[in-house]
Amino acid sequence: MDLSIIIVSWEVKDLLRENLTALLNDSQNIELEIFVVDNNSSDGTVEMVRRDFSQVSLIKNTDNAGFAKANNQAIGKTKGKYILLLNPDMKVLPGTLEGMVRWMEEHQEAGVAGCRLITKSGQTVPHVRRFPSVLDQLSIVLKLPHLFPGILNAYLRTNFDYNREAEVDSIRGSFFMIRREALEKIGLLDEQFFIWFEEVDYCHRVKKAGWKVMYTPAVQCVDYVGQSFKLIKRGAAQKYFRDSMLKYFKKWHPAWQYLVLKIAWPIGQLIAFTGEKINLEVRAKT
């Protein structure tokens, strides 16, 4: 088996249908299997997959298990030489899958790799980042980019050349290809991360184990960017992000950095609340 594709889906039935159709249309020259793990969608996703894509292996959860745990449910069943974690709001282009498998064959040093992600109109989606540091995450928590727009340029690698292949710290989890040998050495995704930071954590583990995390522009994939995430209520999304950030720093960084961020979060929430209130008052007067 060349490739195992895992899609964790939640409330994006129509985009998932488009995704699966594109995958099956691009599978003529490689042997693949597709798993869909549905995190208790209420939009008819499960019925759609069962009715229209009988060749897809479906795992139906009775609650929202999050990204890491849901992927792990399927990873244990895969047989492919490579495992592709693919968001439901993605669309492969002709040759994407075959080209990416070929690229992995030619780059045995890559434990994890991602391709060029583009919008529907063809614009590159920036997604290569450095590993988080306490300073850049503190800036995010305290909303400093609103005052100093360039403060995160280094972290976000705003000068990264997406036309060139490169070893990087981390890539976006929406198109995340893992080599089987690396998976067997490193293990599954860390399920303490519900969403956010799980792919960063895995990239960290890949590098620690002696493999490379690579970006290649050799193939492209359309990314509709966070359609499931948009459905999460703002308060819940912030809680998931905060919890995952703190868990990441507790795992990988000195204790003082974890404590600094933990203390900073209530301050950041107060700043956000105050900013929203001021903005609402200004709007009310105009």
Image (cartoon, rainbow, N blue to C red):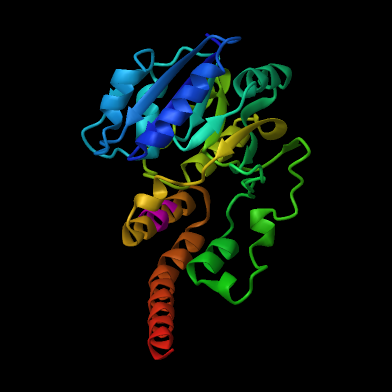
Q: Quadrant of residue 239?
A: bottom left
Q: Quadrant of residue 66?
A: top left
Whether residue 241 appears in magenta in the rendering, the answer is: yes
Q: Which residues are magenta?
A: 240-244
| Residue 124 picture location, percent across and down | 67, 45
Q: Is residue 257 left or right of residue 128?
A: left
Residue depicted at x 37% and y 25%: 36
Q: Is residue 145 above or below residue 5?
A: below
Whether residue 41 appears in magenta in the rendering, the answer is: no
| Residue 168 picture location, percent across and down | 68, 41
| Residue 176 picture location, percent across and down | 55, 32
Q: Is residue 219 above or below residue 276?
A: above
State the quadrant of the C terminus.
Answer: bottom left
| Residue 188 picture location, percent across and down | 44, 29
Q: Is residue 187 above or below residue 279?
A: above
Residue depicted at x 76% and y 35%: 165
Toward the viewer: 49 or 175? 49
Residue 193 visible, this orientation: yes
Outermost bottom residue: 285
